[in-house]
Image: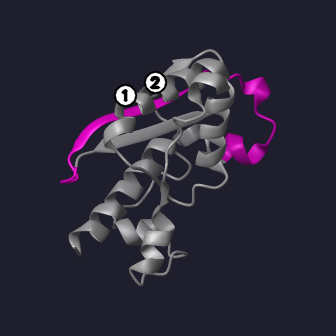
Amino acid sequence: MTVASIVIDETGKEIDSLYIGRKIDQKEIKTQWVRENVIPVLGDYEQVETEEELLDCFWSFWMKYKEKTYCIADVPFPVETRLFLKCVETDRERRQWDAPYPLLDLSSMLYFAGIDPLKSRDQLSTKKGMGHNALDDVDTSVRIWKKLHEKD
């Protein structure tokens, strides 16, 4: 439904962000759980009509920063890996070499730092999250990454 990304510099200062999603057609939502736990916390985001538009917008955002950033995701399989795969598959010939490499995993960083990677992200970031909101999830990951980075 929605995709979010935040770009920060080496000091942790936010440079840019993206929060985009398809317009929601209530008829498409098949499960009560999504209606109760996702829709109410989506907040405001840039809306597009189709999944193809969504993928193209996200890909353009990624390409803008690709050369000078690392992509970090918290447990990137299956969400982020599938997102990048879908982006590449929409124009395989031109995009096949531009997906993130390496795609860094925040949970692995936590484990390496001696922190239980299964610990609640709200506890690790000291900020109560909004539940199933993509932008809030990314913001939480940024906060955790900053904490890990402070230890260096």
Rendered location of residue 105, percent (x, y): 50, 61
Q: Is residue 82 left or right of residue 43?
A: right
- The residue drawn where x is 66% and y is 27% is 92
**Residue situated in front as seen by the camera: 69 or 36:** 69
Q: Which residue is most to the right?
A: 30
Tell me which segment is drawn in magenta.
10-36
Is residue 78 among what the camera can see? yes
At x 50% / y 22%, what residue is drawn?
57
Up-down: is 76 above or below 17?
below
According to the image, label 1 marks what residue?
A: 64
Res. 124 image quadrant: bottom left
Q: Residue at x 56, y 49 (%)?
A: 132
**Residue 101 circle label:** none
Residue 26 position within the rendered picture, expressed as x and y whole percent measured from the top left = 72, 26
Instruction: Find residue 60 and name its label.
Output: 2
Tell me the element at label 1. Answer: helix
Q: Confirm whether the magenta stretch covers residue 11.
A: yes
Where is residue 116? Give x, y as percent. 49, 81
Q: Mark 2 and mark 1: span between their CA atoms?
A: 6 Å
The answer to whether mark 2 and mark 1 are in CB contact below 8 A is yes
10 Å crowding of disc 1: few (<14), some (14-19), many (20+): few
